[in-house]
Image (tube, rainbow, N blue to C red):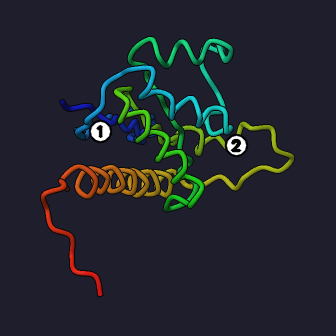
């Protein structure tokens, strides 16, 4: 079976924001079942899943086991690359994808253009739109490489392939 990772990347053209949707196919070998979704529920209990929309946190266990859900994570393009904290979010997207859900990586170019809406006591320096576009494209490539490596190095091995000799 093939499932898609969708990366939503807002692109600036002529002073306007347009969304570019990049789709990358990746294989998964599991089916939706209560057992398979247990790992996602454990990650929620560890605090790795923070926001649920609509806010039905009390019904998350039933919702994630009831069928295919869309799961998204936002990435901030105010830097030119991802940081180690982003890896945890990407791993969660991969966990959800392996269990048959639809992962969406959202690169928040519009948020980067207007500043940080999180209510912090200081404002983040506003970047030039060309820097935001460049950062967004680089982050998009980083995310794709991680998913491609996941596909290449995780799924293409089988137990009949001999392991290299240990020294």
Circle 1: element type:
strand
Q: Residue at x 50, y 52 (%)?
A: 132
Find residue 73 and name its label.
Answer: none
Badges 2 and 1: C-beta atoms under 8 Å apart? no
Instruction: Classify residue 144 as left or right of residue 119.
Output: left
Q: Few, some or many C-alpha atoms within 10 Å of disc 1 (few <14, some 14-19, many ≥20)?
A: some
> Residue 137 placed where, x, y %?
38, 53
* Closer mark to the observer between disc 2 and disc 1: 1
Circle 2: element type:
loop
What count of labels does the image hold? Answer: 2
Question: Which residue is labeled 2 in the image?
Answer: 116
- Residue situated in front as seen by the camera: 166 or 80: 166
Q: Few, some or many C-alpha atoms within 10 Å of disc 2 (few <14, some 14-19, many ≥20)?
A: some
Task: Tell me the quadrant of the picture where the N terminus can be found.
Answer: top left
> Residue 71 placed where, x, y %?
47, 28
Instruction: Classify residue 51 as left or right of residue 10.
Output: right
Q: Residue at x 44, y 51 (%)?
A: 136
> Residue 121 placed where, x, y %?
86, 46
Question: Which residue is labeled 1 in the image?
Answer: 22
Q: Earlier in the sequence, mark 2 or mark 1?
A: 1
Vertical arrangement, residue 55 with respect to residue 15, above or below: above
- Residue situated in front as seen by the camera: 127 or 102: 102
- Residue situated in front as seen by the camera: 103 or 117: 103
The Cα atoms of the two marked residues, 2 and 1, are separated by 25 Å
> Residue 84 placed where, x, y %?
56, 60
Vertical arrangement, residue 108 with respect to residue 136, above or below: above
């Amino acid at each position: 079976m093939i499932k898609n990772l969708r990366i939503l990347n807002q692109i600036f053209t002529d002073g306007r924001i347009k969304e570019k949707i990049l789709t990358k196919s990746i294989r998964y070998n599991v089916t939706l079942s209560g057992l398979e979704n247990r790992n996602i529920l454990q990650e929620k209990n560890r605090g790795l899943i923070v926001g649920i929309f609509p806010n039905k946190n009390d019904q998350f266990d039933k919702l994630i086991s009831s069928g295919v859900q869309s799961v998204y994570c936002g990435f901030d393009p105010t830097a030119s690359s991802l940081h180690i904290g982003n890896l945890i979010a990407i791993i969660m997207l991969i966990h959800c994808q392996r269990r048959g859900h639809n992962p969406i990586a959202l690169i928040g170019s519009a948020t980067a253009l207007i500043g940080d809406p999180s209510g912090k006591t200081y404002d983040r320096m506003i970047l030039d739109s060309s820097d935001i576009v460049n950062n967004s494209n680089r982050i998009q490539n980083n995310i794709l490489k991680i998913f491609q490596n996941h596909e290449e190095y995780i799924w293409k091995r089988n137990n009949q392939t001999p392991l290299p000799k240990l020294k």
